[in-house]
Image (cartoon, rainbow, N blue to C red):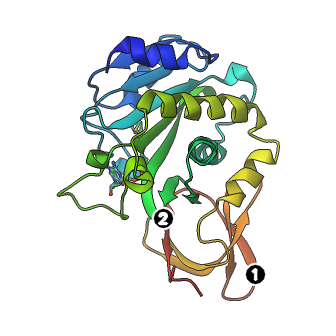
Amino acid sequence: MGKEQWKAALKHLPLGRQYYFEQVGSTNDVAAKLLDEGAPHLSLVLADEQLEGRGRKGRKWITSRGVALAFSLILRPESGNIARNERLSLLSGLGGVAVSKALEKNYPLRVDLKWPNDVLIHGKKVAGILPESHWLGDKLCGVILGIGINVFPESVPEGVELNFPATSVIGELGEEISRPKLLANVLGELVEWYPRLESGDLLRAWEENLAFKGERVFLRGGDEAQVQGQVVGLDPDGGLQLRIESGEVKSFQVGEIRIRAVDISPK
Ligand code: BT5
């Protein structure tokens, strides 16, 4: 798809600079370099294909040519909302809320947000969010908010083992949609919600779509230590609140934690 089509779809948005690539390693890496070179707040890096797309903790994110959305937005501390700290957990929520609103407002779809960074439709992963902060000593230079969305059914990776069942927007909707229009809608939501990062509105919106609410889940840490509990909601920092065995409600932060449903069948 040509640069001009993307540009036309985004022309009404107050973005910084826009960079389009047919192919990159990872849009997050390109955006990090541009952040370093002084690209302004809300600059966008968009690619038609990623060869080394990344998930969290060294995992891979697959973006095949022309069938998905893969982009990164540069957020600068001068914008205010991330001036004091990087707010990575809330920024995962921001990405999730933006994708869910863009889909639910425009299509008859119900979207669930699996804490901390997965977007689900009908229990399958349709998008992933990867916020990464960049520091110079103890000075926050900025955050790169990376978002990958499976749009066409061909974007769902085949022949590779996935950590969660995957799907695509068109696969679930059953009708074709335009990638530039979806991108414009997601970016429009990001621009609208970013100033409300710490307002409580974002947390409420995130919680409304929180997957597994009231259900029992496992949280698995990096050391594979496991906690079981019932999903209660989110804490003010975007951590997950679980009612653990003792009845106590405890917060868990993103760190090295993975969430798994114990039993997601309807009760
Ligand atoms: C994520 O990580 O879900 C974050 C993905 C962020 C991707 C965007 S694309 C633009 C920007 N540039 C980048 O390089 N990254 C960001 P995580 O929760 O760690 O999930 C990764 C796991 O999802 C992998 O280990 C696979 O199992 C699975 N996976 C990989 N590609 C997938 C896809 N296209 N659809 C669904 N699942 C996928």
What residue did someone put label 2 on?
122
Instruction: Sort mark 2 into few (<14), some (14-19) or many (20+) by Cα contacts within 10 Å.
Output: few
Q: Residue at x 72, y 28 (%)?
A: 83
Rounded to the nearest angstrom, the CA distance separating label 1 from label 2 is: 31 Å
What residue did someone put label 1 on?
248
Classify mark 2: helix, strand or loop.
loop
Can residue 73 be seen in this snapshot? yes
Residue 129: x and y in percent read 49, 45
Q: Residue at x 36, y 64 (%)?
A: 165
Quadrant assignment for the N terminus: top left
> Is the residue 215 above or below the residue 92 in the image?
below
On screen, residue 88 versus residue 5, left or right, reads right
Residue 138: x and y in percent read 62, 30
**Which residue, as the protein is rendered here, is positioned at the far front?**
175
Can residue 36 be seen in this snapshot? no
Ligand 1 within 8 A of label 1's CB?
no
Q: Mark 1 belongs to which amino acid?
A: Glu
Q: Quadrant of residue 252?
A: bottom right
The mark found on residue 103 in the picture is none
